[in-house]
Amino acid sequence: MISVIVPAYNSEKWISSCLDSILSQTYSYLEVIVINDGSIDSTGKIIDDYSLKDDRIIPIHQENKGLVRTREVGISIAKGEYVTFVDSDDTVAKNMYEKLLNNAVKYNADISHCGMSYCFEDEIIKTNADNRIFVQNNFEGMRDLLVGEIIEPSLCNKLYKKELLVDSCLDLTVLNNEDLLRNYILFSRSQKSVFENFGGYHYLQRDNSMSKNNLKIVQMARHIAKARKLIVNDSKKNHPETYPYAMRSWLNCYVNFLNQMAFSDDKDVQKYWNECRVLLKKEKSNFKYLIRRQQIAAWLIVLSPKLHQIVYKVYSKKG
């Protein structure tokens, strides 16, 4: 059996489409744990109505705990041999779980995963899906996760053996890049994973007011940096072969933020910008782990912020 964990918070606009896509799967031996995380709209009632129509739905109602802790609740009660996650505003392709389970069994994999399709309103923008299959050993899975070219950091396009998920959260306070952080632990525990390149998970792109709130942008950047630093620390201690990729991932998040916010005149952004620059100065010996383009940006930021602005502006126009 597959346990599907669906945290839901104020999702009345999307939760029906989400649950319909799960319940109509070609693989039907599911339990669907839907957790109403303190919603103040009609999400809870919709979940209860669905549970009356389909006994595979297990409704849970709780005070608001946030996404990370809510997923922990779902993991603690899941009974399936395999576990997966769905965000309540997303949907899944009709054959996604059948394909992921078949691959897990065929290749004796602890993790089976696929690509994602990105949805804008009613339009699905598909990924470059060619249905190729990649089988990854422990190191390859961790490396590919940190590099981010094959493996999406999301938990939602993956099927995990249940035992991998026990105590798999390094830090409950990390609120951005929490999927990457947990996946780092899960892939470190996985002896083998299998990836099939099809866009099985449909990720809804919504207008996010956070993108217009500079203080929240800084808070998000701090959480991302914290998550990736935790991975650096763990890889150095427990998985030294992945340390260069973890270090690259961590430094990348600073370089990307410094690039994107180079022209901001917001005081909170400027303060954090300077903090990041100071950190990069201390990490100059590790610039060797960055790809060439990021190395150049990092050195420009450290040596001459003004020159960095000029070069980045030119580079952005060319892009």
Image: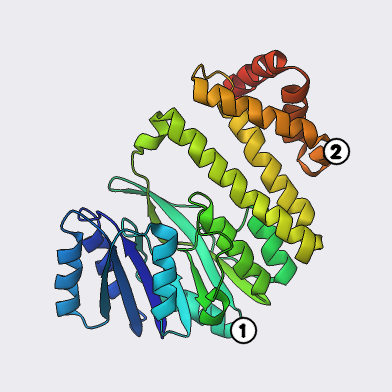
Q: Position of residue 55 (x, y in %)?
A: 22, 83
- Of 190 and 129, nearer the camera is 190
Task: Give SS at disc 1.
Answer: loop
The amino acid pointed to by label 1 is Asn
Is 232 in front, or is 151? 232
State the SS at label 2: helix
The answer for how far apart the CA atoms under marks 1 and 2 are is 41 Å
Check contact, mark 1 vs mark 2: CB within 8 A.
no
Residue 169 position by quadrant: bottom right
Q: Is residue 15 above or below residue 312?
A: below
Residue at point 53%, 51% (across, down): 177
Q: Residue tagged by mark 2? A: 285
At a point 79% along the width and 52% down the height, the residue shown is 244
Please tell me which of labels 1 and 2 falls first in the chain. 1
Q: Is residue 25 visible?
A: no
Please give left or right for residue 24 compared with residue 71 in the image.
left
Q: Amino acid at mark 2?
A: Ser
Neighbourhood count class around disc 2 (C-alpha, 10 Å): few under 14, some 14–19, many 20 upward? few
Location of mark 1 (residue): 108
- Where residue 19 sits, quadrant-wise, is bottom left
135 versus 181 height, above or below: below
Q: Is residue 205 left or right of residue 287?
A: left
